[in-house]
Amino acid sequence: VQLQASGGGLVQAGGSLRLSCAASGPTFSSGTMGWFRQGPGKEREFVAAIRWSGTSTHYADSVKGRFTISRESAKNTVYLQMNSLKPEDTAVYYCAAAPKRIINTAISIQTQYHYWGQGTLVTVSS
């Protein structure tokens, strides 16, 4: 499985961006897709996740109400719509995939995801 993330860029605080993650190779009807981010001088952290079946979504508290994760099965693509962006959202955003369903309590754990994209940089100016 190869993941290609795109859509990053420079945006002013309060603005919006939509990130895309295109998956190629085998995809997993029962798998999980996630977005993580790593800000300057910070460790990589969980942002959001979605079951490939689309049955449930999960968000970090810091992005709830502002970010929306979705997927388009026909295109093997997962999106992260980011609204009301803040300077603290500045980070390299990575998409990740797991070939199996991850239980809710483990969905934010990076080691649950087997495949990672290359990252796309989001910069939010104040």
Image: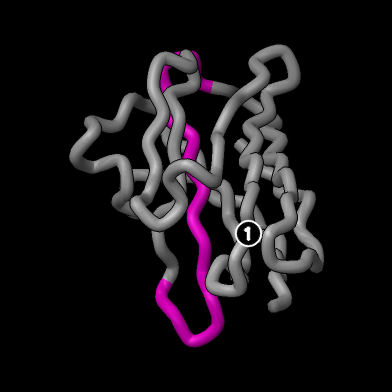
Residue 120 is situated, as x and y percent measured from the top left of the image, at: 71, 60
Q: Is 34 in the magenta?
A: yes
Residue picked out by circle 1: 85
Q: Which residue range is magenta in the image?
A: 28-43
Residue reaching furthest bottom?
A: 41
Residue 94 is situated, as x and y percent measured from the top left of the image, at: 58, 55
Vertical order, 33 against 108 (above or below): above
Question: Splitting the image into 4 quarters, where does residue 27 fall?
Answer: top right
Residue 114 visible to an observer of this rendering: no
Point 59% across, 66% down: residue: 86
Quadrant holding the C terminus: bottom right
Point 41% across, 29% down: residue: 57
Residue reaching furthest left?
A: 105
Instruction: Specify the color scheme.
Output: one colour
The three-letter amino acid code for the residue at tag 1 is Leu
Q: Is 37 in the magenta?
A: yes
In terms of depth relative to the viewer, which is nearer, 3 or 34? 34
Residue 7 is situated, as x and y percent measured from the top left of the image, at: 78, 50
Question: Splitting the image into 4 quarters, where does residue 71 fall?
Answer: top right
Vertical order, 73 against 8 (above or below): above
Point 55% across, 36% down: residue: 68
